Image (cartoon, rainbow, N blue to C red):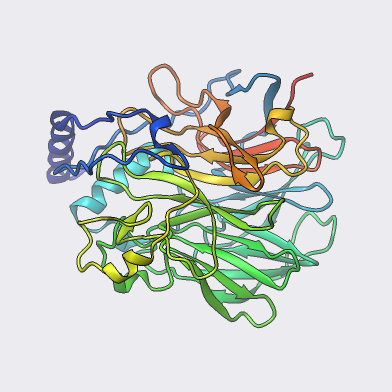
Amino acid sequence: MHKTRLALLIMVAGTLAACGESSTLQVSDGTGPSPKLPEPNKTLIPTVNIAPAIGWPEGVKPTAAADTQVAAFAEGLDHPRWLYVLPNGDVLVAETNAPPKPDDSKGIRGWVMEKVMGRAGAGVPSPNRITLLRDADHDGVAETRTVFLENLNSPFGMTLVGNDLYVADSDKLLRFAYQPGETAIKQAGTKVVDLPGGPLNHHWTKNVVASKDGSKLYVSVGSNSNVGENGLEAEQGRAAIWEVDRASGQHRIFASGLRNPNGMAWEPQTGKLWTAVNERDEIGSDLVPDYITSVKDGAFYGWPFSYYGQHVDVRVNPQNLDLVAKAIAPDYAVGPHTASLGLTFAEGSKLPAQFSHGAFIGQHGSWNRKPHSGYKVIFVPFEGGQPKGQPVDVLTGFLDKDEKAMGRPVGVVIDQQGDLLVADDVGNKVWRVSAAK
């Protein structure tokens, strides 16, 4: 390491230790329909509290909720982040990581953040593939594994409409011809539409879900910064969910002001689209809570000008108070800095009754909070199509006694047998949560 950079890292570490910013609230205070929102606590150097990625020791696994059990569905994967279940029960897993984005690591802040993310397990090269896992004998373990698609560009979201499989790469939406039961696709994909990418591409993960009638595709596109510090011109088409016409590829902004939406799913009772969103960093350990929310057509959710409705973020310059006046608050907070990424509803679940109506959320875990938050899978109960009550822990124990990350949950999905599958991109496994026998 260059001596100047080493000295800088030592200086930053010392400054972080000296500033001592930490939470004054519990994660539960930043959870629910009306989370507590203290005054911003912006420090000269942002809070950096990494849970170093170490992987799972032999024989160790997460802790499952009462009346459930957990086991590995697949092991030895390479940074598995997202999951999709095909109609025949095969499970697709996107083995992926960030694409090259040289402009994102420019300057002192960018360089430090690159080191931070590397220590958290996000610094490995992207495998750029989708792997198919098959549990033909239905014993809860995938005995067949094949490379389904390769040579992609940091793939993430997947959805099937008829015999068309859509994959959201980091810079484009692709369509592939799929035949039921096949274990590999060799034909090249067809580009449906370009997605915001380029040498910055700060929040690179793009997800895709289809409307119930299959005519529209909804694509999530994260922001190109924390709070617009790279210039608002770099945010064109970002911090938004796109609606794409499947036949023509034409698109429009369906909803905006969503800093980094990842998980998307249709709430089964109302049919409304819901998303899980990572909110902004660097204004204290208790701000801003991540959230899940129903997504209203044409709505603006605040980013970057405000958070949780109309709480103005004074760091953003120039401001846009006209847009702030239109910003609506999300439906339900899921804790500050939890990095809530995965989202799936319990439809089809055969887990115990307490998990029958609501949403499962994969919380990848914090870097900007003391103490840590997230690093678990939670369940938010729903009633009448809306969250009701406090979250329930489904899968915990991803941090060891020294606060090191043995795993980090990301994508969540209900499989054909009604069990919950969880992608763990640090543990390089897919976990299966089922009812205890």
Image position, residue 24 (x, y; %):
27, 28
Q: Quadrant of residue 395?
A: top right
* Near-viewer residue (193 or 253): 253
Q: Looking at the rendering, in which quadrant would you find the C terminus? A: top right
Establish if 55 lies above or below 91.
above
1 left or right of 215 in image: left
22 left or right of 128 in image: left
Establish if 361 lies above or below 251.
above
* Near-viewer residue (257 or 16): 257
Image position, residue 263 (x, y; %):
56, 51
* Near-viewer residue (69 or 67): 67
> What residue appears at the point 35 percent right and 38 percent down from the top-left corner?
36
Establish if 423 lies above or below 253.
above
Image position, residue 311 (x, y; %):
30, 53
> What residue appears at the point 31 percent right and 55 percent down from the top-left corner?
226
Q: Looking at the rendering, in which quadrant would you find the N terminus? A: top left
> What residue appears at the point 54 percent right and 51 percent down from the top-left corner?
96
> What residue appears at the point 36 percent right and 42 percent down from the top-left corner?
118
Q: Quadrant of residue 167?
A: bottom right
Image position, residue 294 (x, y; %):
56, 55
